Amino acid sequence: MTSENQPKAGHRDTPVSTAFREFMASGWAADDRSPTPRAEVADHAARRRAALSERFPGERIVVPAGGLKVRSNDTDFTFRPHTAFAHLSGLGSHAEPDSALVLEPAPEGGHHAVLYFRPPAPRDTEEFYTDSRYGEFWVGYRPTIADLESELGLTARHIDELAADLAKDEAAARLRVVRSADGKLAELVDTTRTQAGSPLSAEEQEEADEELARELSSMRLLKDAWEVGEMRKAVAATHQGFEAIIATLPEAVRKGRGERWVEGVFGLYARHEGNGIGYESICASGDHANTIHWTKNTGEVREGDLILVDAGIEIDSLFTADITRTLPVNGRFTDVQRRIYDAVHEAQQAGMEAVKPGNRFSDIHAAANKVIARHLFEWGLLPEGVTLEQTLDQENGGWHRRWMVHGTSHHLGMDVHDCQLMLREEYMDGELKPGMVLTVEPGLYFKADDLLAPEEFRGIGVRIEDDVLVTEDGYENLSAAMPRTSHEVEEWIARVSGAAGNR
Ligand code: GLY
Ligand code: MN
Ligand code: MN
């Protein structure tokens, strides 16, 4: 190669001498850590895998964790594994990027679980001290094969063995993969099963994958006692985060750009108490509350306004809460704020009362909406001549929905919108069953420029959201410890602010 053809060195490509390499490879103490003890979640994950195994006998199932997502240039977002991977492996916030769980059909029937990942490079390799994504010198301790086998009670192998193992026998033609988790692994599975003579067309193969994804989504519908316990932890952590917000409201007013301050305080608790926020926090003061997904959070927090905070903490097992409180910034609702707030609370209570086994999921929305519509009707907001019955007619009515455009409920768990791939007949039209966890979150939103709203309502938005467990004979509000009625909220603010010495 002539000198012009030689690749140009990047500013970080520093030449490394043999002497330096040898020096870096020496002088490290032997790794004498014992393998990670078996995790509590291991048995639960094994049960989930057994259920999946029954559903797809003889098939090789690939559930990738996903890789690091580039934030910009050479920096990545914090890694968060695909939910199906976390659910089936038991690896939550400490999952390794670029791993894959494979359910390997066993000759005796059922499946063996094999976790493929990239074990840490030994101290005598360059990867150890040069690889800023995977080298332990850069990213700290990473588990070994023995660690993961001990912690999770499954077989672990090097990710480099995955391609050959997927192709090794006739099950190569009967592969399914969670496509959305890892594009590169989806391509590998596509090639492998086609080369192995899969009788399915490319389209049919993708349909088979979609069926797997739907199954994995619906498998999370009923939470067992351990999972409900995790939900309780997520809710308790979120409760603390909300109290920290209340304590900081005067500071948020003083500082300017108070919505960001509130977002940051909640984020502090989320990172300290758990893995992080379960979704982007909505910290919406004044008219911003009327933007359903206001996550810019750039606004002021002003005395006399309400601030709507919709936020949830995802704990290390990746279960998340999803809670909304609408708080009067100065601790007292005005009469008109209270009128709207109490209407939303009444709707929420009606929605909760509809949570019982045998009712349909969509009954919750219907019950809450009926209350919302009645208030709007009584306030005279529906068009002239429209009756309550007419607006509640789903096919030909719906005027009240101008002020509450969103649904009242969704399933909740390791994803904030859990079980999202299920079909309408199983989700919206499905029957409520003990063990389901869902939100009840009606709202009323009167935008500042809504000329059909009474002037005194404009700029006020209220949502109240709680996390509810379906029980044998009704429901348990998992977030019941967080005050909800307008009077309770005022007392809550007074108590927390008093303790913080704020007011
Ligand atoms: N924060 C999203 C939701 O409530 O569904
Ligand atoms: Mn929600
Ligand atoms: Mn929410």
Image (spheres, helix red, strand yellow):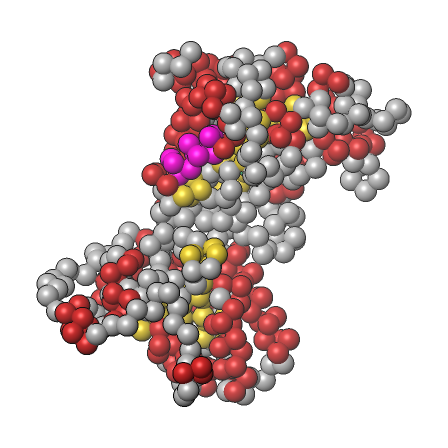
Residue 111: x and y in percent read 39, 72
The answer to whether residue 44 is seen in the rendering is no
Identify which residue, 217 or 336, lies in the foreground: 336
264 inside magenta stretch: yes
Residue at the front extreme?
A: 3
Picture residue at 25% right of the left edge, 61% below the top: 136
Residue 175: x and y in percent read 49, 76
Residue 299: x and y in percent read 57, 30
Identify which residue, 204 or 95, lies in the foreground: 95
Segment colored magenta: 261-270
The answer to whether residue 159 is seen in the rendering is yes
Residue 316: x and y in percent read 36, 47
Identify which residue, 109 or 468, lies in the foreground: 468
State the predominant SS element of the stretch in magenta.
helix
Picture residue at 44% right of the left edge, 21% below the top: 251
In the displayed structure image, the side of residue 193 where residue 425 appears, left or right: right
161 inside magenta stretch: no
In the displayed structure image, the side of residue 320 where residue 156 appears, left or right: left
**Residue 277 occupies which quadrant of the picture?**
top left
In this rendering, the answer to whether 481 lies above or below 359 is above
The quadrant of the image that shows the C terminus is: top left
In this rendering, the answer to whether 258 lies above or below 416 is above
Picture residue at 71% right of the left edge, 22% below the top: 458
Residue at the right extreme?
A: 385
The quadrant of the image that shows the N terminus is: bottom left
In the displayed structure image, the side of residue 133 where residue 492 appears, left or right: right
In this rendering, the answer to whether 260 lies above or below 218 is above
Picture residue at 48% right of the left edge, 20% below the top: 254
In the displayed structure image, the side of residue 438 where residue 27 appears, left or right: left
